[in-house]
Image: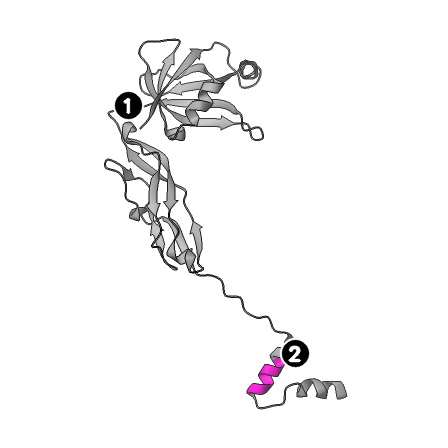
Amino acid sequence: MEQVELLAQSREEFGKKGPARRLRSTGRVPAVLYGAGIDGSVVMSLENKELVKVLHTEAGKNVLINLKLDGADDPRLVMFQEVVKHPLKETIQHVDLLVVSKDHTIVVDVPIHLTGKAEGVTLGGHLQQELRQVKVECMPQSIPDAIDFDITELAIGQTIHIGDLVLPDGVSAHDDPAGTIVSIVAPVTETEEISAEEAEDELAKSFGEEPGAKAEEESKE
């Protein structure tokens, strides 16, 4: 698992509106640090450009961060707990970080990557992916960037469950093994629509009557 360094600065101004807005106008993002060894929480700020770079590594939000607060020589190992973005602009508004230990397992969401083209899709079936990530438990340094699954041999009517995933050593699924990841469903057969008159003709034939006879009788009346 990739580890990156991130510098943080303590902040004295608190508040979600005025202080936070002023901080973001300087190119920094409000952040809070929680976890073992911290009494309550530590409020700080992160440089926005560096924060964006960290979030765009292959590990994404699961990246391990060596956080240096106010230039300290002894960085803390942390991970993202929550990243709040603006609903329209998608800019980062706030970050929560969590201290983790290399000696204790953690539970994280890891993306599921499907590889190959399913045989059932080639034959006309439709792929339905129910889950795009799975919760796993492992040591921080063992977090996989993604879980790959080859669906090449998946036929129409077959389903892959969480329990079918092949996980790296030291990594175990934390979700229900019976949870559905992906299915190949049969194509919907298009049925020819018939009119009410055609339906009556087909019914007449089944009774040995002449098609359209009933309609002629009704017109005479």
* Residue 145 placement: quadrant: top left
Q: Nearer the viewer, residue 48 or 85?
A: 48
Q: Specify the amino acid type for callout 1.
A: Ser
- The image shows residue 58 at horizontal and vertical percentages of 38, 31
Q: Quadrant of the N terminus?
A: top left
Sequence-wise, which precedes: disc 2 or disc 1? 1
Q: Specify the amino acid type for callout 2.
A: Glu
Q: Residue at x 49, y 62 (%)?
A: 188
* Residue 41 placement: quadrant: top left
> Could one spot residue 138 in this view of the protein?
yes
* Residue 101 placement: quadrant: top left
- The image shows residue 73 at horizontal and vertical percentages of 32, 9
Q: Nearer the viewer, residue 193 or 115?
A: 115
**Image height check: is 39 above or below 180?**
above
Q: Quadrant of the C terminus?
A: bottom right
Label drawn at residue 207: none
Extent of the magenta region:
200-206
> Could one spot residue 221 in this view of the protein?
no
For disc 2, the neighbor class at 10 Å (few under 14, some 14 to 19, many from 20) is: few
- The image shows residue 116 at horizontal and vertical percentages of 37, 48
Q: Residue at x 62, y 83 (%)?
A: 201
Q: Residue at x 40, y 30 (%)?
A: 60
Label drawn at residue 101: 1
Q: Tell me the residue that label 2 is attached to.
A: 197
Q: Nearer the viewer, residue 11 or 50?
A: 50
51 relative position to 193: left or right: left
206 relative position to 68: left or right: right
Determine whether the residue tagged by mark 1 lies in a helix, strand or loop.
loop
- Give the dominant element type of the magenta stretch: helix, strand or loop: helix
**Image height check: is 34 above or below 69?**
below
- The image shows residue 215 at horizontal and vertical percentages of 69, 84
